Image: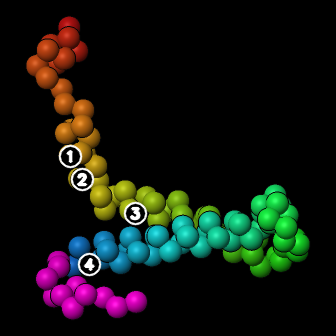
Amino acid sequence: MALPKNFAHKQSNKDRFNAVWDALFYLVILAATLSGFLVSEALLPQLGMPIDILPVWSELHHDLGNLVMPMLGVHLALHWQWIKSMTKKMMPRDKAQKKVGAQ
């Protein structure tokens, strides 16, 4: 995987960290999903594949699942200002609504 030439030069440290974190978060979710397919007792037999679930896949799936939630928390914290501004844009409160809410 090649990074753009200007990746390290034209971004702030925060933006660079954010991009790396988002990529790691994506890979953890992808790995958790794929390992979930491998430990599924319903999916593989439906596809005509013999099922022999190795303990390593179950452990990996469990560990990755436990890693997703704290990573999601960091992801939300990194994007919190964007979430707040988009929420305000998508749910505007006009003056009439403010007056009704104040009564």
To which quarter of the image does residue 20 belong?
A: bottom left
Residue 85, label in figure:
1
**Relative depth, front residue between 49 and 26:** 49
What residue did someone put label 3 on?
74
Amino acid type, callout 4:
Arg
Q: Residue furthest front?
A: 48
Mark 3 and mark 1: Cα distance apart in space: 18 Å
Amino acid type, callout 2:
Trp
Residue 82, label in figure:
2
Label 2's element?
Answer: helix
To which quarter of the image does residue 32 belong?
A: bottom right
Q: Quadrant of the C terminus?
A: top left
| Residue displayed at 49% across by 62% down | 70
Span shown in magenta: 1-12
Mark 2 and mark 3: Cα distance apart in space: 14 Å
| Residue displayed at 21% across by 91% down | 5
To which quarter of the image does residue 4 belong?
A: bottom left
What residue did someone put label 4 on?
16
Label 1's element?
Answer: helix
Give the side of residue 53 with respect to residue 33, left or right: right
Q: Are marks 4 and 1 in contact (CB under 8 Å)?
A: no
Residue 64 seen in render: no
